[in-house]
Amino acid sequence: MIFTVLKKSSKFYALFSGFLWAALLVLFIFSPYPAAAFVQVHISDLQNGFYINRYNFDTFPIMGQANAGKDVRIFANGTLMGTAAPDEAGKFLINLDFSTHNEGPITIWAVQESIRSDSITGAYDATPPRVFTAEIDENSISIRFNESNLKNAFQEKNYRFSPSLNFKTPGGADDIVQIGDFTYQLALKSVPQHEIIRLSMSGITDRAGNAIDPAPVFINDGDRDHMADDWEAENGLDILIADALPDHDGDGFSNLQEYQARSNPFKVLSAPIEIRDSIPQEDAGIVNAARVPDETGFAVLIRSVHGIDLNSADAIRFTIDDGFHVPYIRDLRFDTVRVVKLIDEQDDQATFLWAVYDRFLEPYMHSNYPHNSHIYIKVEIKDVADNILQPAAFEFKIESAAQRAASRQNRPKTEEIYAVDPDSGGSHDAGIQVVEGELAGARVMYNSNEPLTPQFGSQGEIEKVNIEGLEAVGMPVNLAPHTVFDTPVKLFVPVPEDADILSVGLAYHDGTQWLPAADAEGNVLPGGEGWMVPGSRVNHTGSSPVLIEVQVYHFSGTQTVVFASFDGTREEEDRPPGESRSGAVVFVSCFVDSVSPDSRSASWPLSLIVGMIILMCGLRFFINLFRQDLQDLHVFFFTFSVSGRN
């Protein structure tokens, strides 16, 4: 009997079960609850544990997938960072700026309407690591950083010393030992006495990828007075007080000059030799945004009380380290070393001069420095009284190829001048002048035998004068190359029509900053020493435009200025280093169903009612259709229950 009933009702069960599945599908479609969303969040291939560092905090891209046509909001630590509009395929991209956030943990998520992605967590660290202390201990240097567990801190190539120091066993990482979370000890062959050790580092980063602060570290000069601490201690000076300026023995030379000559600051001793200026400026391109051309000449402006014998080969000596060649020496015997005297005096007793090393005149190596290279040059000078200026070290960074290409843009239109300047006695037999634009009329006259040809540089490369007390008039005149000329160049600077030439002076740009160079009467100010020839100013009021003529020893930049109130001095200001920006990529994938949460939430009661009506009608239909089967099934269960009780 059971078999008969099941057989009769098999059609009923098949159809009824199919109906139930259809009803469940209807309820699922019109359900007020959203379908389960598969959400993924990725930060490049790192996902959780990402870092936003100082190089990408303002260009941090978020890419993801969501519904087309509906904005996606990106949050970080609960703050709305921006809104992205997905394209037709649902993909979106937005760059976030974290510069206003506090450093520390960062949690990022994406929201589209009421759907939120999973969160990803990382950290925002925009502070570069730096050296906290650096001390000499016999033949080693201990460096303590302000952050722990730095990357690449064990690589010897990332440390450069001036004067040059060698690791105990050069190459590799065996001479660097970590003696604490923050401290590394560098084993060296030897560390000289009475020297300020200049340490430059590169390639070292923290966990977030921030490169170490590029500013050089000076070791053995705790009070930053440019005198070695061990020399000060041996000569009765205080290593904790900056006392470079006093002259304790009254011989006319400061403690700093005594240190440079290695003389006793408490005994009368005439001596010192002084380096007054340099081209390029110390640390140019490293701690500022200065562009150092690859063909630049290196020069130092020297003053000597007793004079320097230019006939003595070793009176001036350069040691050059470009990072590619073995450090090499050039002195007065070489054609690549020149001297330009600023005072007409005998060669055996020159007291004020430029000493120049020209890399572009080297016969057996590339004439230009490699792009992006750090150049280290040491200068040694001896005067006729056998006073010796201990090696003075200079470092600068050569321009990149991109900077080189950019410098060739926006140059003023010029034409060459072939006439000989009669006022120069025939020494200025070549020239170039600007023929259009705001600098029209500007020109230079020079000697055609100069090692490098003068030219006008890009107009947008240097900003206008920004010295308090000086009013910039006209446009900056950018001049190249940055080298000292054998014969002072005649420079003609146009004066704007609305300015009175009798009230206009000149400012000089040394490659890193503006300095007041000459007043309206043509007197050379401290900032123009070694740049402008004293007494060389001539006003050309009959020309159009009106021109100021001066003679200059070397090039960089100049601009006409009006002096409001200025005392002739200016403190040096460093520009922020130029920074590259690169971003870690954040992928935020939000896979959501095609029905928007808002539309479902507004219509779900009606959808539920419609679904229930369909379900009830379907049940009534099947009951009428299979009434007999249901009766047979009822008889079966009744008979089964009765027999069970019996």
Image (spheres, rainbow, N blue to C red):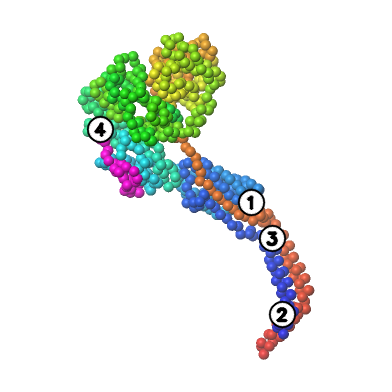
- Identify the residue position indicated by label 3 in the image: 30
Which is more N-terminal, label 1 or label 3?
3
Q: Which residue is located at x 21 percent, y 23 percent?
A: 268
Foreground tag (3 vs 2): 2
CA distance separating discs 1 and 2:
50 Å
Instruction: Answer with left or right where residue 421 lies relative to residue 314.
Output: right
- Identify the residue position indicated by label 2 in the image: 6
- Identify the residue position indicated by label 4 in the image: 232
Which is more N-terminal, label 2 or label 4?
2
Number of marks: 4
CA distance separating discs 4 and 1:
72 Å
| Numbered tag placed on residue 67 in the rendering | 1
Foreground tag (3 vs 1): 1
Q: Which residue is located at x 38 percent, y 27 percent?
A: 363
CA distance separating discs 3 and 4:
87 Å
Q: Amino acid at mark 1?
A: Asn
How far from the left and from the top, in percent, is residue 238? 26, 33
Instruction: Answer with left or right where residue 556 lies relative to residue 217.
Output: right
Q: Amino acid at mark 3?
A: Phe
Which is more N-terminal, label 2 or label 1?
2
Contact between marks 3 and 2 (CB within 8 A): the answer is no
Which is more N-terminal, label 2 or label 3?
2
Magenta residue span: 167-194
CA distance separating discs 4 and 2:
111 Å
How far from the left and from the top, in percent, is residue 69? 66, 48
CA distance separating discs 3 and 1:
20 Å
Q: Callout 3: helix, strand or loop?
A: loop
Q: Nearer the viewer, residue 444 or 594?
A: 444
Residue 186 inside the magenta-drawn segment? yes
How far from the left and from the top, in percent, is residue 433? 51, 17
